[in-house]
Amino acid sequence: MVMKMNLNNKNQIKTNEIKQTFRTRLTGAPPTHAFKALNLEVPNLSVAEFKGAIQKEYKLNPILGIQLIFKGKVLPDNLKISKIGIHPTKDVITIMAIQGGG
């Protein structure tokens, strides 16, 4: 866990960000591209915001539907990452990117 403090011009603390590195695995990708570590600000990050960061990191097409799976359960978008109980250095979040048919 990395703590970062931003100071404004008057040397007062402006914000206090806590960043953690999460290990992720993209299903269906070769092992060299499947595993990545995402360094994200955690306290108020929702699953939907986490999906946006994943989409940028893996360079996934925006048309794909992204589902995050942790301990065998699909995580709902409105859930906060801090409430899930993920241990950043031990747990791996599985990413399923699916394209809907029509």
Image (cartoon, helix red, strand yellow):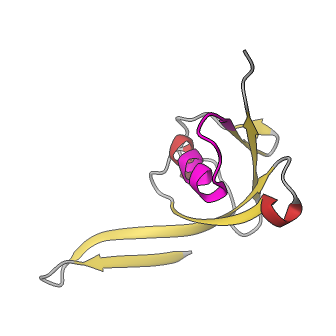
Q: Which of these two is toward me, 62 or 43?
A: 62
Residue 91 placed where, x, y %? Answer: 76, 60
Q: Position of residue 65 (x, y in %)?
A: 66, 33
Quadrant that contains the C terminus: top right
The residue most toward the left is 10
| Quarter-of-image position of residue 100 | top right
Q: Is residue 98 left or right of residue 12?
A: right
Q: Is residue 64 magenta?
A: yes
Q: In which quadrant will I find the N terminus?
A: bottom right
Q: Quadrant of residue 35?
A: bottom right
Q: Where does the image place residue 84, in percent across and percent down from the top left? A: 63, 48
Tell me: 35 left or right of 10: right
Point out the stretch of residues depicted in magenta: 50-66
Look at the picture and state if 71 lies above or below 73: below
Pick the residue in front: 80 or 50. 50
Q: Nearer the viewer, residue 46 or 82?
A: 46
Taking depth in this image into account, of 66 and 74 the one nearest to the observer is: 66
Count of numbered marks: 0
Residue at far top of view:
102
The residue depicted at 57 percent of the width and 54 percent of the height is 56
As drawn, 8 above or below 80: below
Residue 74 at x, y percent in the picture: 72, 35
Residue at point 51%, 46% (across, down) = 49
Point out the residue furthest to the bottom here. 11
Q: Residue at x 46, y 69 (%)?
A: 18
Would residue 52 be counted in the magenta stretch?
yes
